Amino acid sequence: MIVLGIESSCDETAAAIVEDGRILHSNIVATSMDLHAAYGGVVPEIAARSHIEAIMPVVNQALTEAKMTWDAIDAIAVTYGAGLGGSLLVGVLSARTLAITKNKPLYAINHVEGHVYANFITKTALPGYVLPTKQPVFPILALIVSGGHSQLALFRNHFDYTLLGQTQDDAIGEAFDKVAKIIGLPYPGGPSVSKKALEGDAHAYAFPKAKLAGKYDFSFSGLKTAVLRTAQAAVGADFTLPSHELPARLSEAQKADIAASFEHLAIETVVDKTMLAFEEFEPKSVVIAGGVAASSELRQQLSERLPIPVAYTDFKLCTDNGAMIATLGCFKAMHGQFTADPYTLDIAPNLSM
């Protein structure tokens, strides 16, 4: 089963080809991140226009890299939610058109669920990939952490899962972006904060950890506010100091200590919940998914605390990509899941698991 996956939920235009849910033949990603950096975040209109320009070249390049023609493709999979409406629309309309013109079955993919399936890819001839040697075994505990999602889910089997908990406000990736802005680090915030944190003391500041009624729910808005108040106090000001004035007044050492203390606490928050779920449900595998899964701090904390090894996927498969969409598409096809109607499939920007 060879599936072409198309992903366009945010600012990456991506396409990939995966065989049997485990062999990666191509993985092409065109990002418009540079265009958004000046604004400190993704601008939906810019993202949508970039997708329009990039979508077909990316699809064609995925076929070229895989050394395949359309005759080799058994099905098309596309992200239809969650994400930015304009961005999703470009990917879905493109996939619908290709499914009709190439006479291929079409599978509608939940973006968040797709992130989990990046961990099922175990083989590729492409250079520069470090992949797990075997696929995760059910039941699987999945920690999904990215710019738009912070969720903990238990997968009993393919397409049989329970959402245990999720963020009640900001996703962890959003919190990284906002903290980066507070202390004057460039967008995207996750890599910037992590890089700066290497220079700082993770115990320099005692930030609070949210306590919620939901056992497996997350909250990062309070932590973000605590960072703001701490930064204001560090420069001798009170809460009336505008946040945009902080970067110029903070020393590099202060920025590093704030970054390190924030990162350690934010990661510890999601690891604590993961450990609680692991102890309760005793899964055979634990996977982390989403852009924040590339965090070295997250991988280190999990490895230190979990009694079973975690097989991490390649960093390139943690951020948004077509490979995770194609992989889930393979499993949908191989398990006889319903196909989508290429004439009517609509986007679902607020889709949840």
Image: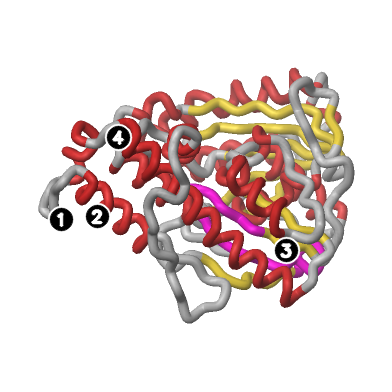
Report which residue position mark 1 lands on: 239
Residue 73: % across, % down: 81, 34
In the depicted structure, whether residue 56 falls above or below residue 259: above
Give whichever of discs 3 and 2 has the lower sequence position: 3
Distance between the Cα atoms at labels 3 and 2? 35 Å
The residue under the point 84% across, 39% down is: 122
In the depicted structure, whether residue 30 falls above or below residue 297: above
Give whichever of discs 4 and 2 has the lower sequence position: 4
- From the viewer's side, name the closer residue of 110 and 92: 110
Report which residue position mark 4 lands on: 184
Residue 289: % across, % down: 65, 50
* Quarter containing the N terminus: top right
Give whichever of discs 1 and 2 has the lower sequence position: 2
- From the viewer's side, name the closer residue of 109 and 116: 116
Queried whether the magenta region covers residue 130, the answer comes back as no
Give whichever of discs 1 and 3 has the lower sequence position: 3
Q: How is the image coloured?
A: secondary structure
Report which residue position mark 2 lands on: 229
Residue 335 falls left or right of residue 76: right
Amino acid type at mark 4: Gly
Report which residue position mark 3 lands on: 141
Provide the secondary structure element on which disc 4 rests: loop
Q: Are marks 1 and 2 in contact (CB under 8 Å)?
A: yes
* Quarter containing the C terminus: bottom right
Residue 43: % across, % down: 35, 38
The stretch in magenta equals: 143-160
